[in-house]
Image: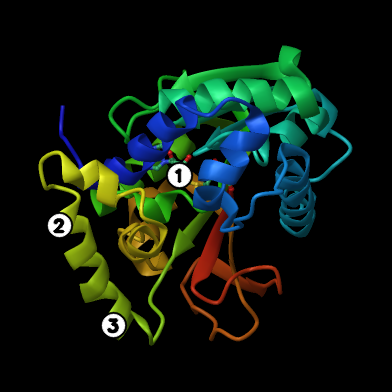
Amino acid sequence: MIRRRQHVPWKAAGTASEQQQSADDVVRGTGWVFNNKRGAHLTLAEFVDTGDQETVAYLSVFGLYTQQVGSQSLVEIGSGIGRMTAGFTRLFRRVVACDLDAAFLERCRETVAQFGKPEVLQTSHVVDGRTLALPDDSADIVFSYITLQHCHRDDALALVREAVRVARPGGHVALNFRTWVPRDVVLWPTGKLVRSTWRLPRIGSRLAQWRVATRLGWQANRLSPRDVLPTVATALTEVTLFRAPSRRPFHLAGATDATFEGVHPSHWWLVAQVR
Ligand SMILES: C[S@@+](CC[C@H](N)C(=O)[O-])C[C@H]1O[C@@H](n2cnc3c(N)ncnc32)[C@H](O)[C@@H]1O
């Protein structure tokens, strides 16, 4: 098994979440790793509400919020503690939440039990951070948000191939990436430096719970459509690249450019149908 330093902050947050008493405590203690909100009065309900709003917004703009969702299955890569998963279970017939951290998946079950439909949920541990333990052609939609940017570059590309493998022919992938922005001149080398501290014996995982440094270090790759599409282009059709309105179009052959104001300027989405 390859040991990735990129896994350290997630495992550290997962372990910390196991020590919290209640689901609200988990959100107060480790919720910032998912939606960057902190505070002594945060609640799981508010946390899930942020996910509900994004879930519907993205599915709608991607053309995936159709009358069929109630009979469809969705796989979520990088579910965390279920910020968006709870909403997905209210919409879809079956939802598979996949995550690198097993403790997050347990918390995800609790979140869905309170705010979603637990009978719809299945969880799947991504043990090696790059392989989904799911059958071929088994999902109508494979969705991933603010996750692939946190993986080692090779693992992110492996997960893209896995998403395409798991989506059925005629199904869709909706995958979110982070690419280069001008301030990466500073952020990229700083991030590398921070990640190197996570290798330090004993204190590495403690440092990975320190919010300021972790937020600098966990953007572990920058992938543009030119990096991602060659790995899966032949398996896809109706490829649309969603970006923030402030970004220039990507102009890639075989792909349509589109904008959505909800997309962060450093992000883009690959939305496509599987052949
Ligand atoms: C920023 S959180 C986003 C969670 C969720 N999508 C949301 O919006 O709340 C990133 C999630 O990806 C998971 N993750 C990181 N690397 C991963 C990998 N290689 N494979 C699967 N999950 C991973 C982390 O454990 C974490 O739960």
CA–CA distance between discs 2 and 3? 16 Å
The image quadrant that residue 27 belongs to is top right
Crowd band around label 1 with a 10 angstrom C-alpha radius: few (<14), some (14–19), many (20+):
some
Q: Which residue is mark 3?
A: 186
Residue drawn at x 72%, y 55% is 58
How many badges with numbers are in the image? Answer: 3
Q: How is the image coloured?
A: rainbow
The C terminus lies in quadrant: top right
Q: Is mark 1 within 8 Å of ligand 1?
A: no
Q: Depth check: 46 or 142 in front?
A: 46
Residue drawn at x 49%, y 39% is 78
In the structure shown, which secondary structural element does the residue marked by tag 1 occupy?
helix
Q: Are marks 2 and 3 in contact (CB under 8 Å)?
A: no
The disc at residue 224 is: none
Q: Which residue is mark 2?
A: 196
N-terminal-most mark, 1 or 2: 2
Identify whether 24 is placed above or below 209: above
The image position of residue 247, as x and y in percent, is 55, 84
Identify whether 160 is placed above or below 190: above
Q: Amino acid at mark 3?
A: Val
Q: Which residue is mark 1?
A: 235
In the structure shown, which secondary structural element does the residue marked by tag 2 occupy?
helix
N-terminal-most mark, 1 or 3: 3
Tell which tag, 1 or 2, sits nearer the viewer: 2
In the structure shown, which secondary structural element does the residue marked by tag 3 occupy?
helix
Q: Depth check: 85 or 10 in front?
A: 10
The image position of residue 90, as x and y in percent, is 81, 29
Q: Are marks 1 and 2 in contact (CB under 8 Å)?
A: no
Left or right: where does residue 199 sit relative to residue 175? left
Tell which tag, 1 or 3, sits nearer the viewer: 3
Left or right: where does residue 128 sit relative to residue 268? left
The image position of residue 265, as x and y in percent, is 55, 77
